Amino acid sequence: MPRTIRLLSLTLPALTLPALACAAGGAHASGRAAAEPVDLLIRHANVVDVIDGKLRADRLIAVRGDRIVAIEPDARAARFQAQRNIDAAGKYAIPGLWDMHVHFGGGDKLIEENKNLLPLYLAHGIAAVRDAAGDLSPSVFEWRDAVAAGRLDGPTIFTSGPKLEGYKSIWPGDIEVGSHEEISKALDQLQGWKADFVKITDNTLSPELFLDALKQARARGFKVSAHVPFVLPIDEVSATGLSSIEHIEYAYKAGSSQEAQISAMVRRGEIDSREGWNRIQATFDRKTALAAYRRLAQRGTAVTPTLNGSFVTTYLDRDDHKQDPYLQYIGPGLQATYAWRVERAAKDDAAAIARRHQRYQRNAAILPLLQQAGVNLLAGTDAGFLNSFNYPGVGLHDEMQRFVESGLSPLQTLRAATINGARFLGQDKEHGSLAAGKAADIVLLDADPLRDIAATRKIDTFVLRGKVYDRAALDALLAGVKQEVAEQRAAQAAAEQAAVPQR
């Protein structure tokens, strides 16, 4: 029974019909309408409108169930009768954040460690994540559906399911295809699993099959994200229908004045891809890049830069991250997957270290060009297994810091972490900004994120689908993860001790 009917039924035994009529007439005569019942009333908030860029001071946000029913000047608060009130004076309200590139993976032995990441996203104000494939897709589909049904606490999960690849790929858990028919069968599987988009990568998949997979997936109505084969010009792939380019270096390639010729040389085997990248960098041209990026924008091809993962690995010579406090929240099995990138970076000599610094700086420098051209930028971390010290949860705040360091404004960065992702996934009617009728995913901050993006780290309260997590509740989430990780480490240590031969 709706709450309003339940409230009226409680009053009926105490009032006669004439009394009810008099009460109604009195309310009408006085000009005062009955207060509208809501579950939550946030008072005196400074609301950040990420769409028009305005800061609206001293606002109320009224929430019923999992929806915002009103955002109005706080002077109208008497209109509402709330079960719970939050005084947000001096606080700043932004939409729940979206991490548009995460990974769950590492093998079946790490299912629980991966599931343990979900509270980390909540603890950092993240309302939704886009899983860009790993090797735990059955579990991820299960978590997605459980979160949607309210059986599991966590961010809303959008997932590609297994990525499409060629035979004998290096990536675990993918679907390997070698023909048009096998691509079709793979897409049948993904549709059966109700995948939210399709991910295609370029390790062993031929360029011909890459384009075929892209065309088939788009014909079925899927959004398609990808790592783009070097031998295919970015312009061609965008024109074929690619929805999003994952990782900024692929977008950098489009800025070469000789990209098509260099790609063709690699395809014919005249040079290898390493030399191809050297030539791309030598021929990068700002005017060419802007024109190419405008074409991406016109076609709706988004870019997920994933800067922070590259930043961490690039500068391991400056910070090895072995003492990061956040490691207390990352399970031992997941931490072990970090080793391969660390070991690879450790082999670099001084010249190689200098080259990777330069490569990161060149890639990051095109972010303002992409923004200027109107490309839809998506804030995503690449966090999860394999990507060293790029942490689920806090990593999105690190990613936003990288955006600002690279030349974007705090507002542009906030959009990349909220409304842009919702729009990309066709969810912007209900998500990505704060407005009446939209999902009640609200982050209350202690400082103004339009002045300093670091303010997004200063979370006072997170309202997710109408459920309130105050600071104590958010800290409790972190404490729970810390305890579980400590128990996992103890169990691992005990197992290792038991495996040591006894003399």
Image (spheres, grey):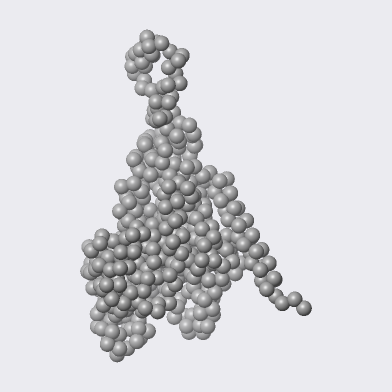
Name which residue lies at 39% across and 26% down.
Answer: 5
Decide if residue 58 is in sight here. Answer: no
Name which residue lies at 45% across and 78% down.
Answer: 356
Given residues 419 and 107, the one toward you in this image is: 107
Given residues 90 and 428, the one toward you in this image is: 428
User: Residue 303, how many percent across, how many down?
Assistant: 33, 65
Quarter of the image where one finds residue 400: bottom left
Which quadrant of the rendered structure holds the C terminus? bottom right
Which quadrant of the rendered structure holds the N terminus? top left
User: Residue 335, how many percent across, how many down?
Assistant: 56, 68
Q: Is residue 77 above or below residue 46?
A: above
Name which residue lies at 43% across and 47% down.
Answer: 149
Residue, far bottom: 270
Q: Is residue 123 above or below residue 191?
A: above
Given residues 89 and 266, the one toward you in this image is: 266
User: Residue 15, how many percent across, how many down?
Assistant: 43, 13
Residue, far right: 503
Name which residue lies at 40% across and 79% down.
Answer: 168
User: Residue 62, how many percent across, how many down?
Assistant: 41, 36
Decide if residue 31 is in sight here. Answer: yes
Total of numbered circles in the picture?
A: 0
